[in-house]
Amino acid sequence: MTRFKLTLEYDGGPYVGWQRQKNGPSVQAALEAAARGFCGEDITVHGAGRTDAGVHALGQVAHIDIPQDRDAATVLDALNHFLIDEPVVVLSAAVVGESFHARFSATGRLYRYRILNRRPRPGTTRGHVWWVPVPLDVKAMNDAAQELIGEHDFTSFRATLCQAKSPVKTIDRLTVRQDGEEVVIEVSARSFLHHQVRNIAGTLALVGKRKWSRQDVADALAARSRASGGPTAPADGLYLVCVDY
Amino acid sequence: MTRFKLTLEYDGGPYVGWQRQKNGPSVQAALEAAARGFCGEDITVHGAGRTDAGVHALGQVAHIDIPQDRDAATVLDALNHFLIDEPVVVLSAAVVGESFHARFSATGRLYRYRILNRRPRPGTTRGHVWWVPVPLDVKAMNDAAQELIGEHDFTSFRATLCQAKSPVKTIDRLTVRQDGEEVVIEVSARSFLHHQVRNIAGTLALVGKRKWSRQDVADALAARSRASGGPTAPADGLYLVCVDY
């Protein structure tokens, strides 16, 4: 048995999310079906993060234990062969030790959130951006974002159904920048609470619309109540960019 | 009656192309249905270029004559309202004189061709790039592209079914550059022959794979025979970026 680290890109649109569920197709199930096609038996694929329905990945990481003696290039090509009809692709495969765990070994995750900030709806980027038609003040968003950097109790930015034991997380980097017609938020942390990035994006959009000030963001964080945080931005604009180990 | 110039973005994936056809949905028909919803009568929409099935637009231009007295903001919002279920969006609308014709008044067109140049298939960009898994020599492609700049008989790069009277066209600019994992070809001319950009992209890819030299491109051009040109690259990677007047 050999453990492989897989780096994955996928379009989250057609899936109920990363995690295998009874109510529809998941990225995990697509990968497990591919592994079954390759290995002829049921094999669990463990992901670094359980992306929500509609959330995309440019560099999700997973690990898989292959019972047969196969090299990394063969695993890569075989999984991609069986994934041919899915918008999921294995970007790389590498042999790792048995102590490697995609989720528990991760030391950092980088998410990107794309807002299409123009009056007309998305045309070619439907399902891949959050459309905000009113002009956003990007500098104000970036300023307010500073309030969220560092170690905080993120209860105000946490889904009420979040199962994490502690609401305390440390945001290492949080930036907001203009990129053509898009406003791009990037945030990195060792790990995140459920909906944390989407709730931060929804809150910073309020700042961008000048409905909230930087102080309002600080107050929302201090309130430690989900009702005090901003709305949850849609899944469409969110990308898991990479996972560090 | 007032004539409006419309600038359009669309995802060409679901359409048989720009032009109204009996065999499936077209961008033109989608816009004409929206105009009918808005004005209550049949109105023809005239486009600057007849993009093929699957070809996208970031800045296609069309004109439309609206019988009622409406301002540009109303036309923009009304058309977008009726286009809500289509991946077609009107980016801007402007009043123009009756002498303006989207196709015949155009003085330049810029197309972009996106090649995803990496071993794994596209994940999040399926249908929006041409996937070429073998490494491309971008510098050689850009060098060879110089052979095609200027006024030439482009018979070797013209679809056999092309209806243009003359195969002579003038390419003003043709560049090939690396952009992350993508190789991006941009080409501008007053007008193009049918499949000209896709045939150029297919030919330059042969150069990128080192199957063809710059001289082979010059020879293909000089042969003035479609059989001498390279293959037609898929529609997925092609974008009509803008039209000048």
Image: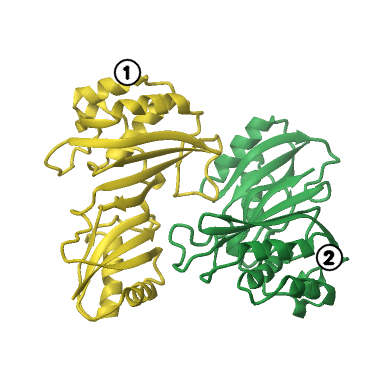
Chain colours: A yellow, B green
- Residue A183 locus on image (x, y percent): 47, 36
Question: Which residue appears at 86% of the width and 41% of the height?
Answer: B99
Q: Which mark is residue B164?
A: 2
From the viewer's perspective, is residue A77 above or below residue A186? below
Say what amino acid the circle numbered 2 marks: Ala
- Residue B50 locus on image (x, y percent): 72, 58
Pointer 2 chain: B
The answer for how far apart the CA atoms under marks 2 and 1 are is 63 Å
User: Which quadrant would the N terminus of chain A be assigned to in this image?
Assistant: bottom left
Q: Which mark is residue B46?
A: none
Q: Which of B62 and A59 is in front in this view?
A: A59
Q: Is residue B172 left or right of residue B116?
A: right
Q: Name the residue under label 1.
A: A215
Say whether residue A27 is visible: yes
Question: Which residue appears at 37% of the width and 30% of the height?
Answer: A204
- Residue A41 locus on image (x, y percent): 20, 79
Q: Is residue A100 left or right of residue B35?
A: left
